[in-house]
Image (cartoon, rainbow, N blue to C red):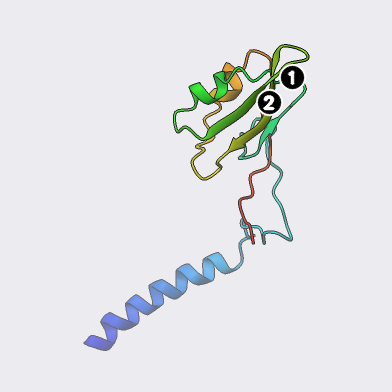
Amino acid sequence: MQFERYGKGIAKGLRVTITHLFRHPITAQYPEQRLNTSRRIRGNELIWDNIKCTGCSTCAKSCPQGAIKIITAVNPEENKYTVEKIDVDTGYCIQCGLCVEVCPYGALFMGYAYERAQY
């Protein structure tokens, strides 16, 4: 009696296994095989163009997580702000893209890198 109950369960499980055994795999062996990603992907790489950036800090103000810190200094020769450092904490960044949309000079760009593996 118990053998019939367990035998039917094992047979059902083997049937599922055997039917999937001869199908083509849909997974990729990453990193040896990489899938082609769309150009519309919004990766975790924030690219900053220091030539276009004026240090207005609108990107830092628009960040909902407060992940962007901009350190500026006054250049006495040109009487303008110069950006000394832009610090993006990728641990807090949620890749929402608000900083890219808000930047009036187009100094920020969301890259296509999506790999977060680090050593």
Give the residue displayed 78% in from the left and 15% down from the top. Answer: 77
Which element is circle 2 on? strand
Residue designated by label 1: 52
Vertical arrangement, residue 93 with respect to residue 5, above or below: above
- Measured as percent of width and height from the top left, residue 24 is found at 64, 60
Residue designated by label 2: 83
Q: How crowded is mark 1: few (under 14 residues within 10 Å), some or many (20 or more)?
A: few
Comes first in the chain, label 1 or label 2: 1
Please indicate whether residue 7 sits to the left or right of residue 17 in the image: left
Give the residue displayed 26% in from the left and 80% down from the top. Answer: 5
Mark 1 and 2 residues: CB-CB less than 8 Å, in contact? Answer: no
> Where is residue 33, by image quadrant?
bottom right
- Measured as percent of width and height from the top left, residue 117 is found at 62, 56
Kind of residue indicated by mark 1: Lys
Q: How crowded is mark 2: few (under 14 residues within 10 Å), some or many (20 or more)?
A: some
* On-image quarter of the N terminus: bottom left
- Measured as percent of width and height from the top left, residue 27 is found at 61, 57
Q: Real-space Cα distance between discs 1 and 2?
A: 11 Å
* On-image quarter of the C terminus: bottom right
- Measured as percent of width and height from the top left, residue 58 is found at 55, 18
Vertical arrangement, residue 83 with respect to residue 80, above or below: below
Which element is circle 1 on? loop
Q: Which of 84 and 15 is in front in this view?
A: 84
Give the residue displayed 63% in from the left and 57% down from the top. Answer: 118
Q: Nearer the viewer, residue 77 or 27?
A: 77
Q: Nearer the viewer, residue 33 or 53?
A: 53
Please indicate whether residue 55 sits to the left or right of residue 76 in the image: left
Kind of residue indicated by mark 2: Val
Task: Report the label total.
Answer: 2
Q: Which residue lies furthest to the left in this view?
A: 1
Please indicate whether residue 74 sits to the left or right of residue 77 in the image: left
Vertical arrangement, residue 31 with respect to residue 84, above or below: below
